[in-house]
Image: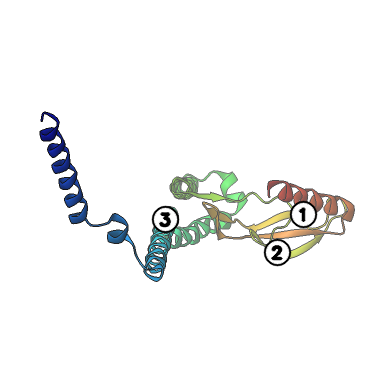
């Protein structure tokens, strides 16, 4: 008699569990998808991921280009103005060169003061340009470089290697790493070719080492 209520209780519990199991949807049936649908989802995911990566790369490139453009704008925004000021500086130098050496040596007060004033103006102008990144080239003794020099004539000089700059007709200037105005120069001719070739080979080897 005492075992019957216990047995009935077990039967009722099993019946309840069976009923809950029947009412609960099958997990496999609820989440199963046709293979085509799963492949479509994977393809869509990969497409979205690829678009995201491309967009991220484009934004990074845009950021770098913008930073470079801003830097260039700051460095080279005065290029045209600086080039015009160099023309003024050239005129000041021509004015000084036009004063006869005898007159300057005579030490006339008015002429001497005028010359000193022009020289001070020239120095102040070049100093102001230098503060904005404009620097003068010093090509004497260097190998002729068409990127920075403009050859005006050749000079027969057997004492220096061929293509060595020996004279400067007009000063050249750069702003940052860009040529503002090439230096007009005279180039040596008739010197030892072996030295010139050795110099060119050394420069080529240095460039290859950097790369």
Alpha-carbon neighbours of circle 1 within 10 Å: few (<14), some, or many (≥20)? many
Dividing the picture into quadrants, the one containing residue 66 is bottom left
In this rendering, position of residue 192 left or right of residue 142: right
The residue at the point 57 percent across, 50 percent down is 136
The residue at the point 39 percent across, 69 percent down is 40
Can I make out residue 77 in this image? Answer: no
In this rendering, position of residue 209 left or right of residue 79: right
| Percent of width and height locating residue 171 | 60, 55
Distance of mark 1 from mark 3, alpha carbons?
Answer: 45 Å
**Which comes before the other along the chain, label 3 or label 2?**
3
Instruction: Check the image and tell me how it is coloured.
Output: rainbow
Closest to the camera, between mark 1 and mark 3, is 3
| Percent of width and height locating residue 25 | 23, 57
Residue hosting label 3: 60
Q: Are marks 3 and 2 in contact (CB under 8 Å)?
A: no
Distance of mark 2 from mark 1, alpha carbons?
Answer: 11 Å
**Which comes before the other along the chain, label 2 or label 1?**
2
Distance of mark 3 from mark 2, alpha carbons?
Answer: 43 Å
Can I make out residue 40 in this image? Answer: yes
Question: Which of these two is toward me, 144 or 152?
Answer: 144
Alpha-carbon neighbours of circle 3 within 10 Å: few (<14), some, or many (≥20)? few
Q: Residue furthest top?
A: 2
**Which comes before the other along the chain, label 1 or label 3?**
3
Q: Residue furthest bottom?
A: 36
Residue hosting label 2: 151
Q: Are marks 1 and 3 in contact (CB under 8 Å)?
A: no
Closest to the camera, between mark 3 and mark 2, is 3
| Percent of width and height locating residue 73 | 41, 57
Residue hosting label 1: 164
Alpha-carbon neighbours of circle 2 within 10 Å: few (<14), some, or many (≥20)? some
């Amino acid at each position: 008699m005492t075992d019957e209520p216990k047995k009935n209780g077990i039967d009722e519990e099993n019946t309840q569990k069976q009923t809950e199991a029947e009412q609960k949807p099958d997990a496999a049936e609820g989440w199963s998808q046709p293979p085509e649908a799963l492949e479509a989802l994977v393809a869509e995911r990969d497409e979205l991921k690829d678009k995201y990566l491309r967009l991220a790369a484009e934004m990074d490139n845009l950021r770098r280009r913008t930073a470079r453009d801003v830097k260039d704008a700051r460095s080279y925004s005065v290029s045209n103005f600086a080039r015009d000021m160099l023309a003024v500086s050239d005129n000041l130098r021509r004015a000084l060169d036009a004063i006869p050496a005898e007159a300057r040596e005579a030490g006339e007060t008015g002429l001497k003061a005028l010359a000193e004033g022009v020289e001070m103006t020239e120095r102040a102008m070049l100093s102001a340009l230098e503060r904005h990144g404009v620097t003068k080239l010093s090509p004497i003794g260097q190998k002729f470089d068409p990127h920075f020099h403009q050859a005006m004539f050749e000079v027969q000089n057997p004492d220096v290697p061929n293509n060595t700059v020996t004279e400067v007709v007009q000063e050249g200037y750069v702003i940052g790493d860009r040529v503002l105005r090439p230096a007009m120069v005279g180039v040596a001719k008739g010197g030892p070719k072996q030295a010139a070739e050795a110099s060119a080979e050394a420069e080529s080897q240095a460039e290859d080492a950097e790369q």
